[in-house]
Structures are given as C-alpha cells and as structure tokens.
Image: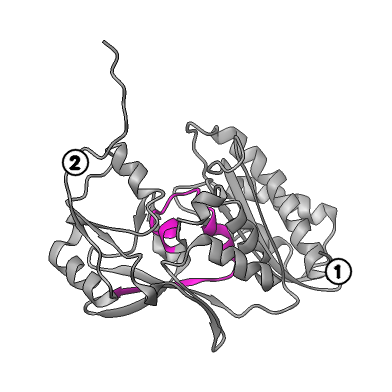
Amino acid sequence: MITVNTRILKAEFEYFTPNTIKEVLHLLDQYGSDANVIAGGTDLLVRMKNEVISPSHLINIMKISEMSFIKAEEGWLRIGAATKWHEVVEFCAKDRKYTALYEASCSLGKVQVRNMATIGGNLCTASPAADSAPALLVFNSRVKLTSAQGERIINLEDFFKGVNLTAMAPNEIMTEIQIPSINNGMGSAFMKITRVGADISKISCAVALERQGDICASCKIAMGAVAPVPMKIDQANKIVIGKKVDASLVEEMEKKVSEEINPITDIRSTAEYRRKTAAILLKDVFWKAWHRAGGDK
C-alpha cells in the first residue's frame, strides 16, 4: 500500500473575515495566541499543510481596504501591511529612489506569488531569509503595531527576535511599514543567491549609500539568511564611511562582514558557503549601489 501525502489542511479551525481593523483587534483580544492572521497565505498555508502550526482560529484580513495602500507624505513612505507585492513592485518601478526594495520585491517568487503575498506577511513570518527585510533595513524602516489598547512604532531591526519570532504581542497586528524619505542622490541595490530561480535565498544582501565624489558619506548594509534574524551589518559599513572608496577599502569590508555574520548549515546551504559568499555578495552589491549613487543606472 502506498501512502500519498496530499498536504491538505487536516486540522479544523474557525475562520473569520472581518471588514475593519477594529474587528480584527476584537478577535485577537478574544482568541490571542490561539489565532493566526492570514493575508495572502503563501507562507502560512504551507506551514499549516505541513502541520508546523495548527491555529484554532484563522483571521483573514484581505477584505480590509484600510490596510492596503502606498502613500508618500510628511517625510515618510507609508505602506499598508496588507499591500500585495505586485503593488510594491509597480510603485518602486516608478520611483527609483527605492531601487533596493524594487529589486527585493522582484526577487520574491514568481508573478503568481507576488499577486497574492503581502509585504506585512513577509515580515511577520520572521524568516531569516525574508527577501524584503534587508532592503527595508538599509532604508531605516520602522513598523506600526496596533492593538485594541493603542498603537506603537518600533524600528524594523527591533521587530525580529528569532526564527519565526517577532516583538508582536498575541493581541497585536502589524498595520503599516514606514520608510523615511530618501535623498535623490542615494544609491541602493539588492541581490540574493538561490538554488533555483524564485527560490528562498541562500543568502541576500542590500546596501544603501550616499557619496560625495569619491568619498562615502553614509552607508547601510543588511543581510538575510546569515543569522537567526535578518541583520544590519554594523561593523563593515563603518570601514568606508567618510573615506575615499577604492578596491582595497572594499576588501576590508569583505573580511569584516565574514566575521560579523553568524550563519548556519541547513537544507539550502552550509555555514561555510554562506560565510565565504557573504564577502563576494557584499562587494557586488556595494559597487552596484556606489555607481548608482554616482548617477549610473
């Protein structure tokens, strides 16, 4: 007899489709950690089928229009947490100040996935390899968390607490991602390495920088899949800030980043591969951002 795993949802759960954030918060207050919020479901449903999680209550937020928007106002780019990835791609294609986010968005799965998946869902899954995280980290992004008791805003780097762990309380929901206004002269880039196209990354990197001629005025670096959480690389970037950039200086950055990360071996790659590749990837992404800050495409 051959047993076939059809990956159907075997566990029973109560399903809700609220129309407002207020209704969502009421349900979260009522069910707390026994409930899961679902948007596009591209990750959550897979985890449910694989019986990694079995929520008793599922709250679908995709009917809530007030959670899906992209607005540039008052010094911030505000993105609703339920905004789908294809909308982020379309916006960033028009406003190329956000090039790293555009490249990260385009790398996230196939078109079918980007038509379903949401930016908030990618962050709330808290995967170390979340494609959106490095790009949002180098732009100093923050997130708004909302509960029935009120709102709080935290920096994105403080949101991730471990593999699939966040700073969000059981009665909270992420409602918004906020990116500070970006100077027109900033150059940014994102790249990732995968086993096959549209796969989750083995390792990813984003860089955002400003230059004054040959001097690096500012630099932010972030990487994914090199630690338990997506992380800012705080030591390597200090090597170039305020200095004339050349190949030898970038080599120093390469050495430092390999020391700073803490990769593991898993089904996608080995820790040794990630450590060695991190240096090469950083170099490629840095030079790409550097040339863009100088006006190149």
Say if the magenta span includes residue 86.
Answer: no
For disc 2, the marked residue is 11
Q: Residue at x 31, y 34 (%)?
A: 7
Write down the region rendered in magenta. Answer: 120-146
Please say whether residue 137 is visible from this viewpoint: no
Drawn side of residue 282 relative to residue 25, left or right: right
Sequence order check, earlier mark of 1 and 2: 2
Q: From what the image shows, is residue 270 above or below residue 167?
A: above
Image coordinates of residue 173 in percent, x first then y, are 31, 68
Q: From what the image shows, is residue 266 above or below residue 224?
A: above
- Camera-near label (1 vs 2) is 2
For disc 1, the marked residue is 214
Q: Quarter-wise, where is residue 68 in the image?
A: bottom left
How busy is the neighbourhood of tag 1: few (under 14 within 10 Å), some, or many (20 plus)? few
Image coordinates of residue 172 in percent, x first then y, are 27, 68
Disc 2 element: loop
Q: Residue at x 18, y 72 (%)?
A: 26
